[in-house]
Image (tube, rainbow, N blue to C red):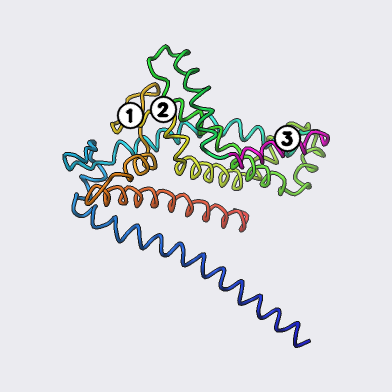
Amino acid sequence: MKVREMKETLMKIVFLIAACASVLAVILICVFLFANGIPAIRQIGVFDFLLGKTWKPGNNLYGVLPMIMGSIYVTAGAIIFGVPIALLTSIFLARFCPHKIYGFCRSAINLMAGVPSVVYGFFGLVVLVPFVKEVFGIPNGNTMLTASILLAIMILPTVVGVTESALQSVPDSYYEGALALGATHTQSVFFIVVPAAKSGIIAGIVLGIGRAVGETMAVIMVAGNQARMPKGLTKGIRTLTSNIVLEMGYAADLHREALIATGVVLFVFILIINLIVTVLNRRSEHGK
């Protein structure tokens, strides 16, 4: 009995250490980012940094607004292209997919989540960039549109996984009640089951937004990486993540600190998205 209690106590300590290590890692990242980024923002000026339209480190100009807008636009494009496909895929898997092919379809979606982003980048570089260049007759296919399409593909596993779980968690009595009232299978799914899973579906979309905002490597390979205000779907852009990765290798002094401050802006973006997910999950738990 004592041996068993000792094992349980030991495992509790191991779990506690693991949890503390995770929390400590988050705290250290926060401290590093804000300790190195905030002084740079103060030195540059909050409004000059966040609202400045010119990023020229050689002239000590560090305006990240083009990168902020680039991240927002390319993420919005990914949501517009990817979310309808993800929702319909989730509904198919949850309510329409024949049992014989469900395993294959689910495995394929899960496989997409495990593909490295650099592989998606190669796919975009070899397939999507020439495709966009040919269709729109532009000299260079590295554009905002290309990055949006590629990100739309990359967020599918995230949105599909969460949304399908939300649809599966809807009590069968909802569906059966709709059938009892004379609704067809399709009507019951789209007008009863899908609205009932609304909070989970929104949470999946928000997580997809977080995936799109944080993506770096694939976007670098297809977005054009031009540090200027976005001028259209068929023009190049640079995102916050791309800005950090492209210049951190040779940056020094204020330039380096400005890149870390860019990371602070990105961190705040992700923090806001996580807060939204938390609020939605709480509302879902309370049945609101």
Label 2 sits on a secondary structure element that is: helix
In-image side of 46 versus 168 (left or right): left
Q: Residue at x 76, y 35 (%)?
A: 104
> Outermost residue toward the bottom?
2
The kind of residue on which mark 2 rests is Met
Kindly check if marks 1 and 2 are in contact, taking CB atoms under 8 A apart as contact: yes
Kindly check if marks 3 and 1 are in contact, taking CB atoms under 8 A apart as contact: no
- Point out the stretch of residues depicted in magenta: 98-115
The kind of residue on which mark 3 rests is Cys
> Outermost residue toward the front?
250
Label 3 sits on a secondary structure element that is: helix
Tell which circle, 3 or 1, labels the residue nearer the N-terminal end: 3
Position above or below: 210 against 1: above
Tell which circle, 1 or 2, labels the residue nearer the N-terminal end: 2
The numbered dot on residue 124 is none
Q: Quadrant of the N terminus?
A: bottom right
The numbered dot on residue 230 is 1
In-image side of 163 versus 277 (left or right): right
Q: Is residue 183 visible?
A: no
The numbered dot on residue 144 is 2
Q: Residue at x 76, y 82 (%)?
A: 4
Tell which circle, 3 or 2, labels the residue nearer the N-terminal end: 3
